[in-house]
Image (spheres, grey):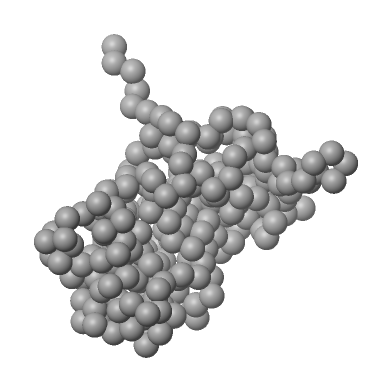
Amino acid sequence: MSSPPEAAVRVEEVVHAYGTGSDAVTALGPISLDVPRGSFLVIVGASGCGKSTLLRLIAGFERATAGVVRTAGAPPSPGTGAGIVFQQPRLFPWKSVGGNVELALRYAGVPRGERARRVPELLERVGLHDVAHRRTWQLSGGQQQRVSIARALAGDDPLLLLDEPFAALDALTRERLQEDLRRVSERTGRTSVFVTHSVEEAVFLGSRVVVLTKRPGRVALDLDLPLPRTGLEPLRALPEYAALRATVSHAVRDAAG
């Protein structure tokens, strides 16, 4: 019998603390999670529960105080193996929209000739095919985040990590970008880990939701979301969506204490 495939992300009995000695504050754990390949995991919880800390551990920006984090079977290394989208776009304002994406492709090792072909493809994927020539400061906040997503998709990284990327946007723009990200996720099949404090966003985007307790963050709820992953027709109007949103909302409130 063949062994099961390696999880895209594996978190085993992880604890993470800031500071040392009597000043140490445990932000997270112990926590264990497996994220199967191709799934869309959303981590949700109140502010300060450790959800962004967990994402930084998965990205390799920080090392766990105890326990093991692995991506594709190996310890995570910053800048390799994952595309990352932050709350702020962090674009290069002296470059055009296309130039920002082209730079990401260059860092990913894509040859120059292929970069010229891939830039419009990536911008088309996030609905920005007609703004490649513009400077990033000429775009709205929502458009800048679309560029960030296109840049994160530039490499062949099988993992996409997103840290509250829509938190600073107005409600209408946020809803539109949620729909866009869901479509991109369906088309690319990449494994995604998305951090948010919004229950609505978690249930709309995720194929699975994990709710964390207040600090130190532990798993309060681990719930698969059996909602359609293809098509967006009235997903938010489905009674199943409303029921799942209520379940997750109650869990978040209880976990926040």
Picture coordinates of residue 179 (x, y %)? Answer: 35, 67
Horizontal side of residue 37 vs 18, given as left or right: left
Residue shown at 51% from the left, 59% from the top: 163
Image label count: 0
Horizontal side of residue 165 vs 8, given as left or right: right
Q: Is residue 90 visible?
A: yes
Depth check, front residue: 66 or 176: 66
Q: Residue furthest top?
A: 1
Q: Residue furthest bottom?
A: 138
Picture coordinates of residue 233 (x, y %)? Answer: 29, 67
Residue shown at 62% from the left, 34% from the top: 14
Q: Write down the quadrant of residue 230 in the picture.
A: bottom left
Residue shown at 49% from the left, 63% from the top: 86
Picture coordinates of residue 252 (x, y %)? Answer: 64, 54
- Residue 89 vertical position relative to residue 240 in the rendered view, above or below: below
Horizontal side of residue 220 vs 7, given as left or right: right
Depth check, front residue: 257 or 190: 190
Residue shown at 30% from the left, 79% from the top: 96
Picture coordinates of residue 93 (x, y %)? Answer: 40, 79
- Residue 246 vertical position relative to residue 87 in the rendered view, above or below: above
Q: Is residue 254 visible?
A: no
Q: Write down the quadrant of residue 168 in the picture.
A: bottom right
Depth check, front residue: 180 or 56: 56
- Residue 18 vertical position relative to residue 133 in the rendered view, above or below: above
Horizontal side of residue 231 vs 30, given as left or right: left
